[in-house]
Amino acid sequence: MKRFSCDESVELVTAYLERELDQVTAGRFEEHLGGCEGCERYLGQFRTTVTALSELRPQRLPDDRRERLLSAFRDRRTS
């Protein structure tokens, strides 16, 4: 069976963390991690980032700033 490349593994990180990979693919992913320190480190960094971001609470923008931002998006879309 062909081993995953690092590029293939990086593409699967989100699906792996969300437990969306089938058993065979998850096994191959974990096998790659076991032999690749860089991908193992990347997965750890990704987990840390997800955890940190999940602790953030949304903050409401002041109405004038929100309107300027929305206006900029609208202008960019029509350009």
Image: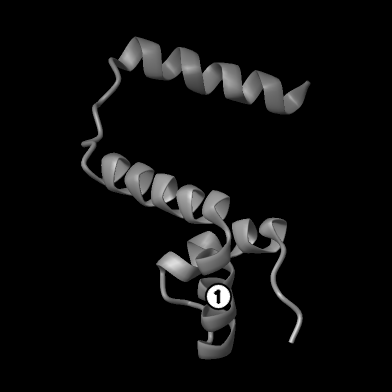
**Looking at the image, which residue is at 33% across and 45% down?**
48
Q: How far across and how far down the image is residue 32, in percent?
A: 59, 69
Give the image's coloring scheme: one colour
- Residue that badge 1 annotates: 31
Q: Quadrant of the C terminus?
A: top right
Q: Quadrant of residue 65?
A: top left
Q: Say whether residue 31 is left or right of residue 65.
A: right
In the rendered view, tell whether residue 43 sits above or below residue 71: below
In the rendered view, tell whether residue 50 sits above or below residue 59: below
Q: How far across and how far down the image is residue 26, in percent?
A: 52, 79
- Identify the secondary structure beneath mark 1: helix
Q: Nearer the viewer, residue 63 or 31?
A: 31
- In this rendering, the count of numbered labels is 1
**Looking at the image, which residue is at 52% across and 82% down?**
27
Q: Quadrant of the N terminus?
A: bottom right
Q: Nearer the viewer, residue 34 or 16?
A: 34
Q: How far across and how far down the image is residue 50, in percent?
A: 35, 48
Q: Quadrant of residue 12?
A: bottom right
Q: Amino acid at mark 1?
A: Glu
In the rendered view, tell whether residue 47 sits above or below residue 35: above
Q: How far across and how far down the image is residue 41, in percent?
A: 47, 49
Q: Say whether residue 19 is left or right of residue 4.
A: left
In the rendered view, tell whether residue 54 sits above or below residue 7: above
Rate crowding at label 1 as few (under 14), some (14 to 19) or many (20 or more) other CA atoms within 10 Å. Answer: few
**Looking at the image, which residue is at 62% across and 25% down?**
74
